[in-house]
Amino acid sequence: MSDSTKYFIYASLFFLVSSLFCLPAYASSCWLGQSATLSLGTSNAQGSALVSTDVIADCYFNSNQPVTYKLCLVADSFDPVGSTPRSMIIYNPVRALLNYELYSDAARTFKIPDSERKNQAQCQTFQFEAGTGNVSNRLKLYGQVLPGQNVPAAYYQTNSIGLKLYSAYKVGSEVPTDTEALANSNTGNNNLIVNSYYENSCLIQSTTDINFGAVDQLKIPLISSGNIQLACPVGTIMQVSLNNGINAQGTQRRMRNALGNYIRYNLSRNAHDDQPWQGNTFYSVDNHNIPVYATVPAQPISSTGQYSDTITVTLTY
């Protein structure tokens, strides 16, 4: 190989390196803005209203072409424990947890996952014109206290929730995939605070009908039962009263049919029928599940038809 040939090869290599060095450079990154607070308001045994807040994701790029971002949000609950459901906590008067969930949509179809389940995240796409520079994107986050909890009345709050933002971008009209965003190890992090006040209120959640079935004659007593379901904060002193119904004769409860005939019946607080529910009398209860036992004594039936009565349940606390 001659010296002139060697010189030509070196020059070609130098030209190639110079060309790579001169390609236009595009910088892009996304991060989470200020820490977010999600106040779920007042809650009780029925849960809470669905509440939302905005999580701000800021992105920077200096491309001279349009840019499309894919942003995916996850949330890690460190203290107290639990990601499904998540929990708020109090320490006084006792240590207690109030469960809630985080969602990425108002229909509560998609829960916001933790990092271990990040592939379940509902990623969002954002598109921006060329040369936009810094842009802020609002990621909606929804939360709700779950129903069916009986905990002490108090103000509950999370200790630590870490929000993590996964992102990917592409220059031009092409859209990054969820997989590309979630595979990016360069994440933006910040914190989320969730709180709610569990109010000192009681609810009669449900009552079940007492059905004695169909009979031809009442030559032997009929026995059945129903149930009253209460929901009160832990430690609440509760009292329950049943009235005498809408067809009573004095203190005797009665069922009535469409023809105006009656069948007598009695209500009791135990299965032995020796602790009657006296009408309009309050009895202390220490359980949220209150059984009501009923007996129809043997008696003549004046006419056929459906007999019924309505009892009003009153709860004080």
Image (cartoon, rainbow, N blue to C red):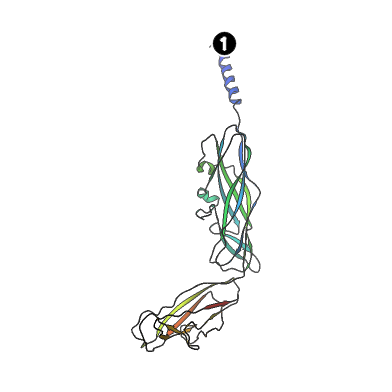
Position of 213 with respect to 102 (left or right) is left
Count numbered badges in the picture: 1
In the image, residue 245 sits, relative to residue 50, either above or below, namely: below
Q: Quadrant of the rendered structure where residue 14 is?
A: top right
* Residue at 58% in and 60% down: 87
Residue situated furthest left in the rendering: 216
Query: Which amino acid, by three-letter code, is at mark 1?
Result: Ser
Secondary structure beneath dot 1 equals: helix
- 283 w.r.t. 16: above or below: below
Where does label 1 land, which residue? 4
Q: Residues within 10 Å of mark 1 (few under 14, many from 20)?
A: few
Q: Give coordinates of residue 21: x percent, y percent.
A: 61, 25
Across and down, in percent, residue 19 comes to 58, 23
Determine whether, in the image, residue 212 is placed left or right of residue 67: left
Horizontal relation, residue 171 to residue 212: left or right: right
Q: Can you give x and y, in whole percent of width and height, for residue 303 in the image?
A: 36, 85
Q: Is residue 40 above or below residue 2?
A: below
**Image coordinates for residue 71, horizontal then vertical, percent:** 56, 44
User: Which residue is found at the position 48% from the left and 78% from the top?
Assistant: 291
Q: Nearer the viewer, residue 279 or 289?
A: 279
